[in-house]
Amino acid sequence: MEMELTDRFGKIPEEVNNLLEISHLKILAKEISITKIESRNGDILIEFKNNKFADVDALLKMVFASKGKIKLDGERVLFINHKKKPKLDLAIESINTLTLL
């Protein structure tokens, strides 16, 4: 879609590009049962439908392998802690990582 918009209207403004990325993010999130993505103090909090993730073992392996960058906050929310990235980039990276599990 981005290429089509660029063909028709030229360079896409950053706001439109962000809107396209957010739309893509929502589609990916729905596919893996994410109901809420929230930014809090530079961190991304992800909540799953019915507080469950499909492959809990893979999720736990990812958390342990992250060396503190990814944490579980109770049973409901995956807490992804990266302070240096823009919120939208971090959310996209986080969802993409979860779709690989």
Image (tube, grey):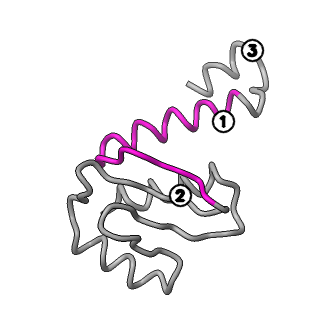
Identify the residue under disc 1: 18
Q: Quadrant of residue 77?
A: bottom left
Lower position in the chain sequence, tag 1 or tag 2: 1
With respect to residue 86, does 62 lie above or below? below
Queried whether the magenta region covers residue 31, the answer comes back as yes
Which amino acid, mark 1?
Answer: Asn
* Residue at image coords 62%, 48%: 88
Q: Position of residue 10 (x, y in %)?
A: 78, 20
User: CA separation, marks 1 and 2?
Assistant: 14 Å
Q: Which residues are magenta?
A: 16-40
Q: Is residue 32 magenta?
A: yes
Tell me: 69 left or right of 101.
right
Residue depicted at 37% across the width and 76% down the height: 62
23 with respect to 9 (left or right) = left
Name the secondary structure under disc 1.
helix
Q: Which residue is mark 3?
A: 9
Pointer 2: what residue?
93
